[in-house]
Image (cartoon, rainbow, N blue to C red):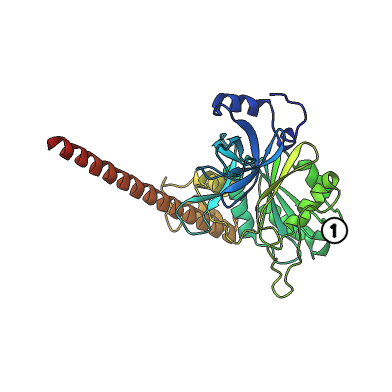
Amino acid sequence: MSENSTPLTEYGWNATLSNTFTALAPPDSAPGRVLRVDRGRCDVAVAEGTVRALSGSDPLCTGDWVAVAELRDSREPEMRTVTSILPRSSSIVRSSASGKSEGQILAANVDTVVIATASDGDVDLGRIERLLALAWEGGATPVVALTKSDAAHYISDTLAEVSAIAPGATVLAVSAETNEGMDVLDAVLDGTVAILGPSGAGKSTLANALLADTTGADRLETGRVRTGDGKGRHTTVTRELIPFSGGRTLIDTPGLRGVGMWNAAEGIDKTFPEIEELIAGCRFSDCAHNSEPGCAVLSALRRGDIDERRLASYRKLQRENAWNAARSDARLQAERTREIKVISRQLKSHYRGRDR
């Protein structure tokens, strides 16, 4: 396939993906990237432009690279269908907001995650740590953007406080209104960029500022926060992939009310590296860091080397991650048990038929 500039290459198509597609995709299919998913259908960028397609049997997510084919015998002749999903290079996953024992993919094939946090009010350090764990676990590079810095009090103190709980991540104070820090933010973004954060964090305003050079106008709808509690309205209701300058793509996401851990053990470790380093010095390998003798973590806490809030946050995320993993294991075990019972009934029916 030609690597000349097409609507598909604007969304990140390259020679490596072309080789993967050739090796794995079904015959009579074409490559595409999912721009938006809604109610069993999706918008897909292909070499000729954008098409509508049925999502297929496997769950799709914005950012997925897929194979699409013509839908035969359809009442909608322009409709395509997704026949397969190419392996994901990364995925940002949280525990399902519905409470089911399964993960929910927020974005696929993401290189950079921008964690947007409004700095003109109380900054939730625990939420930032959660989103950092999701980003690290998903295989993306996190960047924390302290938005609305032009309206923030003591922004330098906030910047220092957040930087202390985000080792390994870039932390910036930015303002889409005054352009403060936007050039630095733009410089550290690479590949496919997903913006995550709660409603009212200024995600869409930030996205519009980043897209300005590409679109020349606000691409995404924005809304004011409520004056009573400072919370935002959900102006973004779906995830959408948009190309922007430098051959990059951007995913704006709806505000996240809950950020549950899902198979995020490695991401949690990367978010709390100072605690993980201390754990290696505990006397017992199964130390729970509560009251055990020879606990290096508790010793560091007594010395003031680690913060009590930070340790509590680490413990909370670890417990939550373990609980969701146990629920998932229980669900998988129940599914296997049901499958075994179905197979057993089929075998019994088969042999009873032979004995007659």
In which quadrant of the rendered view does residue 122 lie? bottom right
Task: Say left or right for 35 vs 329.
Answer: right
Most distant residue in the bottom direction: 228
Kind of residue sitting beneath label 1 = Glu
Locate residue 176, reporting x and y percent. 82, 55
Most distant residue in the left direction: 356
Mark 1 neighbour density, 10 Å: few (under 14) some (14–19) many (20 or more) = some
In which quadrant of the rendered view does residue 198 lie? bottom right
Q: Nearer the viewer, residue 300 or 194?
A: 194
The quarter of the rendered structure image containing the N terminus is: top right
7 vs 76: above or below: above
Locate residue 304, reporting x and y percent. 60, 57
Task: Say left or right for 206 vs 93.
Answer: right
Locate residue 156, reporting x and y percent. 79, 58
Task: Check disc 1 and report the residue beneath it.
Answer: 177
Q: Residue at x 70, y 44 (%)?
A: 193
The quarter of the rendered structure image containing the C terminus is: top left
Locate residue 324, reporting x and y percent. 45, 53
Q: Residue at x 74, y 68 (%)?
A: 225
Q: Is residue 248 visible?
A: yes
Which SS class for mark 1?
A: loop
Q: Residue at x 78, y 56 (%)?
A: 205
203 vs 229: above or below: above
